[in-house]
Amino acid sequence: MLPERGRSLLTSPASKEYHQTIVNAHHRPLHGNLGSIGSIFNPASVAIAGAAEGRIGQAFLACLVDSCFHGPVYPINPRGGEINGIKTYRNLADAPGPVDYVISCIPSDSTRLLIDDCADKGVKTIAFFTAGFSEMNGHDGRRLEDDLVFRARARGIRVLGPNCLGVYNPGIGLSFSSDFPGQSGQVGLLCQSGGNAIYFIRAAAQRGIRFSKAVSYGNAADVDESELLDYFAADSDTKMVAAYIEGVKDGRRFFEACHKLAALKPLIILKGGSTGAGVRAASSHTGALAGSEEAWDTLYRQTNAIRVDYLEEMVDILVTFNYLPRLEGRNVIVCGAGGGFSVITADDYARYGFDLVGLPQHIRHTMSEHIARFVKSEAGFMMANPVDITNVITFDSHYGTLQILAGFNDVDLLVGQFSVNNSVWPASGSKYTVWIDTFTEALAKVHAETGKPSALIIHSMLTPFDLEKANTLAERASQAGLAVFHSSARAALALKRVQAYHEKTGPCSA
């Protein structure tokens, strides 16, 4: 039964022996306990404690309904009634079926009784959206969190969080956002921040990335980053792993988990709290102990985990792994629209160690003959590398040009590029918007027919129309198998990091 709001439930025993028991339980290692953590990602039923109109519990319920969760969902509220047209139960014991996974949206001082109710019901996991624990940087919050873990573990219950959003598993319709893709993919995500998890999944999904499973794990009071890495290392559905981490509970164990996973599949890590200001923010966000920059540099170097510095870069790396093979060399050819962007793109690729290989005379001659079928003059064209074909606008002109370039055997990567706001007529249906539609379609067709590794860079999104157009094109290109990026610098950096990973791990890498 859920207690009344404001009722204090934490009665901390005074004995030092009891306090040490809690501390020992909190830090007890869980090596080999993958069966237990596996149940976290695959519950057959869910209950929401604290499901009330206009509160976060109602939002969690809506997410599960919208995502078509495969099992029963039980809203729990002492008042009973209905929420979103679904019967609400006064307490967990009244739920008519077994409950595997509970989402806690109740106040922190009510969590002790919730654990008792969950134990009586046979619950396997509680995901605590509830905050007010160690992230508060106070002694009472830490003691409350330690007590929470001690009581849950003593009853065989795993704890996610507190201060987290829990699990996203599209394969069973378990989600903490209604707009996440319903299709499963090959990326596993562990993210200490709930807000960053939502942003990252949405940003990656817009560029064609799909997830096997993702977890927002907050304060990591019980299930922590090392155990999650071990799980993803063993999970056959997960082929690559992205991690946003603010702090580590056990440095040695974390190193071992990273080393083990990165030997099997790509591991990309964004360390939050790498500056003094970031460390202070991480401490107040999830109570994390950040560790030194030197220690993290050593970890990246010795485990072959891939370091990134911001969330968008982590998406870029996943796009590169997902859509591009290991390149045979570093020769790149760029074709698209905009002389200025072509110059910038050339600089960016050269800066990150790629060669914009010169086009031999026979390739340039063949391309000139092809373009002459559509225009009277080559004025305004760049016929070297990068190639600027702004002045031809039909599908056939784009397709033929890209086909010629893809057939050049000395090219390892074909890059298409344009800006969505490069027209003096920035409106739907204008000459330039037709150009970028036909160019995207032509690049996708050439890629499908030739198998040439190909990428599309969509530059410069400024207005609402630009953003809508860019998102539409990115989704279309991703569905056609193209790696999509939003700047040449980001594309070149991601490619550099992934090529370095392949060079270090060798041809047998995942």
Image (tube, rainbow, N blue to C red):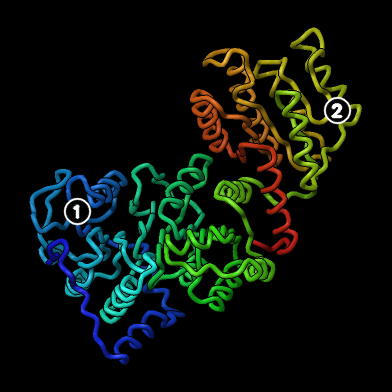
Residue at image position (73%, 36%) is: 414
Query: Is residue 312 visible to us here?
Result: yes
Q: Position of residue 409 (x, y in %)?
A: 82, 39
Query: Is residue 237 visible to us here?
Result: no
| Label placed on residue 363 | 2
Relative to 426, is 37 above or below?
below
Q: How many marks?
A: 2
Residue sitting at the far right: 361
Q: Which residue is mark 1?
A: 51
Task: Using a 10 Å C-alpha cutoff, classify the residue at mark 2 as few (fewer than 14 neighbours), some (14 to 19) or many (20 or more).
Answer: some
Q: Position of residue 197 (x, y in %)?
A: 44, 52
**Apparent side of residue 144 relative to residue 439 in the rendered image (left or right):** left
Residue at image position (56%, 16%) is: 426
- Residue nearest the viewer, comparing 59 with 120: 59
Q: Position of residue 125 (x, y in %)?
A: 30, 68
**Could you tell me how far apart the alpha carbons at marks 1 and 2 are, in whole angstroms?**
66 Å
Q: Position of residue 492 (x, y in %)?
A: 71, 44
Select label 1 or label 2 by which is in front: 1
Kind of residue indicated by mark 1: Ala
> Element type at marker 2?
helix
| Label placed on residue 102 | none
**Apparent side of residue 217 relative to residue 289 in the rendered image (left or right):** left
> Element type at marker 1?
loop
In the rendered image, which quarter is residue 169 located in? bottom left
